[in-house]
Image (tube, rainbow, N blue to C red):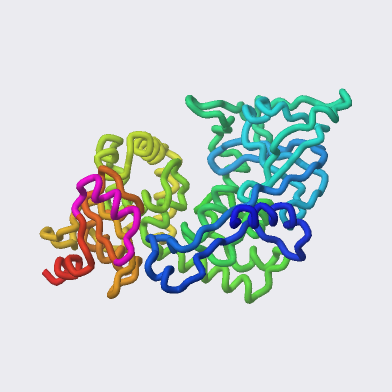
Amino acid sequence: EVIDYVHSWVERRPDLDYEIDGIVIKVDRLDQQETLGFTAKSPRWATAYKFPAEEAVTYLRDIELSVGRTGVVTPTAILDPVKVAGTTVQRASLHNEDLIREKDIRIGDTVVIKKAGDIIPEVVRVMEDQREGNEEPFSMPETCPECESKLVRLEEEVALRCINPNCPAQLREGLIHFVSRNAMDIEGLGEKVIAQLFQEKLIHNIADLYKLEREQLLELERMGEKSVQNLLKAIEASKENSLERLLFGLGVRYVGTKAASTLAQEFETMDNLLEADAEKLESIPEIGEKMADSIARYFAKPQVIQLLEELKELGLNMEYKGPKKSDQPSDSPFMDKTIVLTGKMENYSRSEAKKIVQELGGNVTGSVSKNTDLLIAGEDAGSKYTKASDLGIEIWDEEQFMKALSN
């Protein structure tokens, strides 16, 4: 009966005055809800049924290329505007050349598109029966569309890359990444402002951001006195960021926010990190061979060493400001252990417990595996508790956690 009801709404969905992407099915008795309880992420007495993604037919007018901060060249389909899942779609990523060949996508094709997860537009298939013979097969270029350097395909990759370190597109995208929220978090420096500064040749690299002057900025369109003051203040304040933000902002390949924090805590200063070779880096938990090699190669580049020296001279902090390993008690029960938190605690939020464990030298991860040393479980622990029990991993309740802290 429930399934039939759900299926009936799959057909009636387009008739609604608002957009929905599924139906939530719940047990409607409060006593039964209480008995069923919760997992770490969701109630056991409710489940969501997602509708199949809505599809639409449109015309593929062209294929454009863009270059990302890591040099990857991505093809994008330019489409006749069509409404899909509540919004008008005019562009869809084609990801790489292999996908274009696999689906035999050509300029001038009539294509079926959908939004993956009702969010990201993608080309599902070509309507080959509507071809008229004048469609153009697409081939990726041999040179970068921005700087005309030769494109390469690295081993075990499907993407084509521009490996010119001075490629304007990579420099621009790298600057956008550097100022982003998880990196240096410079408020007022969005994509449009970065593009404007880059176009006016006021910035070429990260160091140039810290050389911007009031008079230069006031000459830019839509830059008044107040905006300029706030921007310069935000840039100045970013100099005090902890080392992990700078490391993530530099855009070292494979290094995300978690790895940047791990490196900053391990080495504490940029100088210490620069002295580490790939073997030393690989010995750190969570830094695998591929990442260690990437980090070592990056910091061995003369232009990177020069950039870091320049940033240091401009007053950027090069030290880790978080809890240091040297400050952590050597007898901590969490020191160098991989720990998973699950369930609801009475005295701590999840983020509070995570911070405590990290300050005491523990490494908190989100999932249970054979590498997990300890599971700390609150109420309604769910599947993580079951998996940890099956793997024979040590499990603590909140009382044991609090007792360990008091000791």
Q: Quadrant of residue 23?
A: bottom right
Instruction: Name the residue at 80% across, 42% down.
Output: 57
Instruction: Identify the residue at the far front of this view.
Output: 1
Instruction: Name the residue at 32% across, 42% down.
Output: 287
Total tally of numbered discs in the picture: 0
| Towards the viewer: 346 or 264 | 346
x and y, in percent, of residue 171 in the image:
57, 45
Residue 387 is covered by the magenta coloring = yes
Q: Which residues are magenta?
A: 379-394
| Towards the viewer: 311 or 371 | 371
Instruction: Tell me if residue 229 can be seen.
Output: yes
Q: Is residue 172 left or right of residue 280?
A: right
Q: Is residue 122 left or right of residue 360?
A: right
- Give the quarter of the figure containing the N terminus: bottom right
Instruction: Name the residue at 80% across, 28% down.
Output: 128
- Give the quarter of the figure containing the C terminus: bottom left
Instruction: Tell me if residue 268 can be seen.
Output: no
x and y, in percent, of residue 130 in the image:
85, 30
Q: Is residue 155 left or right of residue 40?
A: right
Residue 225 is covered by the magenta coloring = no
| Towards the viewer: 305 or 120 | 120
Q: Quadrant of residue 187?
A: bottom right
x and y, in percent, of residue 83 in the image:
78, 52
Instruction: Name the residue at 36% across, 49% down.
Output: 259
x and y, in percent, of residue 138 in the image:
74, 27
| Towards the viewer: 324 or 9 | 9
300 up-or-down from 36: above or below: above
